[in-house]
Amino acid sequence: AAAVLELESAVGVEFRDTALARARWAALLLLGGKMIEASAQFAAALASLEVSYGNTHPRCTQVAAALGSCLANMGKHTAAEPHLRRAFRAWEASLGPEVSETIGMQCELARSLKEIGKVEEAASLFKQAVASSKVALGENASITLERACYLGDLLHELGHGEEAEQQYRWVQAKQRACLGEKHPETLEVQTKLGDLLTETGSLEEAEKLHREVWAAAQAEGNEAKAMASAVHLASALQKRRKFAEAEPLLEAELLWREKVDGIGSEGFLASVRNFARFFEDQGRFIECEALYRRSLA
């Protein structure tokens, strides 16, 4: 900080050495978790570098990328978007679409777009990013699979069920081959596929997938995972009108949530609402009322 102020005093705010020193200071602030200060210094450095070098200079692009990432990490996605878009387009043109820096910035931009409601554009960018990742990093690379899974999430959110299912199935097949059937990442995408199939009406397969995830969590002895997977399984069972099998799963999860989080917690109330909908679906309004009264006790 002292060096930046000294340079600023000696040669001026817009002198390129001052701006570069300010950008390095911002990076140090960011490493220290001081994101508000870092974003202000990145913005000041960028403004000065644009005067010194011009808007299209690679150093300006680098600082714009850092500023955009910093703002996105702060949850300021609207402010982050133009900086991330600028960096992505510059690197796409200068480095090419299948370079890791370009793909990474493309994904950062897409995630911010999703957060501000531009889900269609986010999905389009992620489709390109997944295709580029397959070429640049390989189909079995963990980051390629992670991006393909996120693309499935975006397509699911948009209501593009068939495309989302294709992504989830592709990722699941790769993860089973690379990581094994019981690996947490394999089971995570299997849960997403099961939920999608529950929504789209492929209930028999959805139940089968969720039973496998539930059994794996029980075998692992992870109570939290077992309870979470029980809720997903109960949803598939409920859609199949298998109420007698679904009810004890939901009841067990509610009791566990009460024990772990306590009555009145957000998690407990979410479980109450979920269980209440189960009773409403069957016209069992007395049990539904009792549940809500219990949550207010």
Image: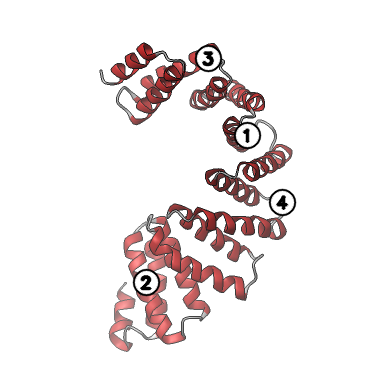
Graded by Cα atoms within 10 Å as few (under 14), some (14 to 19) or many (20 or more), the crowding at tag 3 reads some
Disc 2 marks which amino acid? Ala
Q: Which residue is mark 4?
A: 139
Viewer-side residue, 145 vs 26: 145
Graded by Cα atoms within 10 Å as few (under 14), some (14 to 19) or many (20 or more), the crowding at tag 1 reads many
Q: Which of the labelled discs sits on residue 243, or is there none?
A: 3
- Residue 141 percent across, percent down from the top left: 68, 50
Q: Which residue is mark 2?
A: 43
- Residue 256 percent across, percent down from the top left: 42, 19
Q: Which residue is mark 1?
A: 190
View extreme (front): residue? 283
Closer mark to the observer between disc 3 and disc 1: 3
Closer mark to the observer between disc 1 and disc 2: 1
Left or right placement of residue 233 versus residue 173 in this view = left
Left or right placement of residue 283 versus residue 108 in this view = left
Closer mark to the observer between disc 3 and disc 2: 3
> Does the residue at mark 1 contact the one at mark 2 (Cβ under 8 Å)?
no
Mark closer to the chain start, 3 or 2? 2
Viewer-side residue, 137 vs 245: 245
> In the structure shown, which secondary structural element does the residue marked by tag 3 occupy?
helix
Closer mark to the observer between disc 1 and disc 4: 1
Whole-angstrom CA distance, mark 1 to mark 2, is 42 Å
Left or right placement of residue 87 versus residue 170 in this view = left
